[in-house]
Image (cartoon, rainbow, N blue to C red):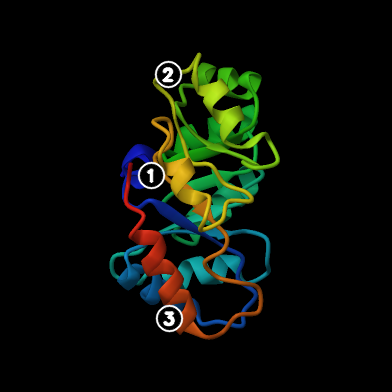
Amino acid sequence: MTIDAIMRTAPVIPVLVLDGLIDPVELAETLVEAGLPVLEVTLRTPTALDAIRAMAQVPGAIVGAGTVLNEAQLAQALDAGARFIVSPGLTHPLALAARDTGVPFLPGVATAADIMRGLDLGLDRFKFFPAESAGGIAALKALSGPFGDLRFCPTGGITPKTAPDWLALDAVLCVGGSWLVKAGETDLAPIAERARAAAAMGNP
C-alpha cells in the first residue's frame, strides 16, 4: 500500500502509546472491528516493538510504527512487521533510508521549510505535527495554500470534538487520534465505543 492509500483507509489513525497493561492483539482486534484498521504504535515504550509484532498478525490490521527518529529505529520497526512509518519530524537520513526500503513514510512537518524539504525528497504526504500547538486549522489552511497538491494527517492535540473540523479541510485525508486509548486503560468496551464514533466521522 502507498502512504496515500493508507491515509484514505479510515478517517482516524489511532496513535497508540502501549504500556503493556492491555493485550495488543485484543486491542488491534477491537479497533479493526470498530472500523479503524490503520494503527500507529509509537516507539515510546519498551513494549512497542513486541506489540507491533503481535498486532501485525491480526487480520485486517495495517500496523505502523510511530515516533521513528532514526535509521536504527526504522530497521527495528520493519523487522517487527511495521507496514508504514511515522516520524515527528523530517530529516534527510531518515527520509532517504525510508525511500531505500520502499516503506510508506509519513514524516512530521510544521513549517513551509519542512514541507519544501520533503518535496525535495519526493514526498507529498505529511503529518502536520503538533497540529494544535503549531497553529491549528488556521495554520494548516495557510500552509496548504502554496502547496495545493499535498495532503496531511494532522496529529497532536486533536479531540473527538475538533476532529470533524480538521477532516472537513480539503488538504486533510485523516487525523491522528491519541484520545482512543487512554493511559492505563484496560477495558476494551469504552475503547470500542470511541473507535466506532471515530470511524463514523467518515472521510471528507
Quadrant in which the C terminus is drawn: top left
Identified at 49% across, 50% down, the residue is: 163
Kind of residue indicated by mark 3: Glu
- The residue labelled by disc 2 is 148
Secondary structure under tag 3 reads helix
Q: Between disc 3 and disc 2, whose residue precedes?
A: 3
The foreground one among 155 and 19 is 155
Quarter assignment of residue 199: bottom left
Q: Looking at the image, how many numbered discs can be counted on the residues?
A: 3
Q: Position of residue 49 (x, y in %)?
A: 57, 65
Quadrant hosting residue 18:
bottom right
Left or right: 198 with respect to 50?
left
Q: Are marks 1 and 3 in contact (CB under 8 Å)?
A: no
Q: Is residue 75 visible?
A: yes
Q: Is residue 30 above or below residue 75?
A: below
Evaluate whether residue 56 shows in this view.
no
| Residue occupied by mark 3 | 26
Gap in angstroms between the C-alphas marked 3 and 2? 40 Å
